[in-house]
Image (cartoon, helix red, strand yellow):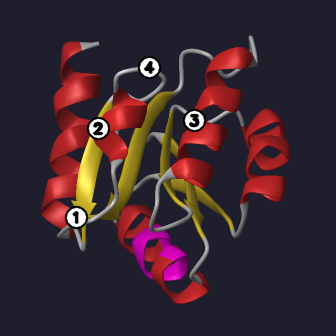
Amino acid sequence: MDRAACPLRILVVDRRPEVADNLAALLSAHGHVVQAAPCASTALRAAKAFRPDAALIDLGDDGRETYAVARAFRDAPELSKTFLVTMADGSAPMSAFMDRGPVDVHLVTPAAYRVVAGALQCHFALA
């Protein structure tokens, strides 16, 4: 995904610093402006200051913390239109949370960069 002419502001929220840093580096290399947040407690504060176009969120295997952050984005007026991509391993029961609607796309980890980039590209090409 190459959007250097129109870079996105992307917040990467992941409890594993090496994963967040790698994804942030890939997105930055493709021309996007990226910030990382390591946990739920900093994610919303970082998002309110950064005002991302998209947020990629993976905070736990059971999906509850990830869902809580997504719900907080939707409840904050200044973040309610942020494109939300959640990521969790295949055993996480995300379907129960997805029915409640705060998430735009859910990916199963480990997701290849091209899958993440494809989700962003599809959404912003249609927006």
- Dot 2 or dot 1: first in sequence order is 1
Q: Amino acid at mark 1?
A: Gly
Q: Which residue is mark 1?
A: 90
Residue 4 visible to the viewer? no
Secondary structure of the residue carrying tag 3 is helix
Q: Amino acid at mark 4?
A: Arg
Question: Which of 96 and 17 lies nearest the eye of the viewer?
Answer: 96
The span from disc 2 to disc 4 (Cα, nearest Å) is: 9 Å
The span from disc 3 to disc 1 (Cα, nearest Å) is: 18 Å
- Tag on residue 100? 4
Q: Residues within 10 Å of mark 4 (few under 14, many from 20)?
A: few
Q: Residue at x 14, y 61 (%)?
A: 114
- Dot 3 or dot 2: first in sequence order is 3
**Magenta region:** 20-24
Which residue lies most toward the bottom here? 18
Q: Nearer the viewer, mark 4 or mark 3?
A: 4
In the displayed structure image, the side of residue 46 where residue 25 appears, left or right: left
The span from disc 3 to disc 2 (Cα, nearest Å) is: 14 Å
Question: Which of 110 and 10 lies nearest the eye of the viewer?
Answer: 110
Secondary structure of the residue carrying tag 1 is loop
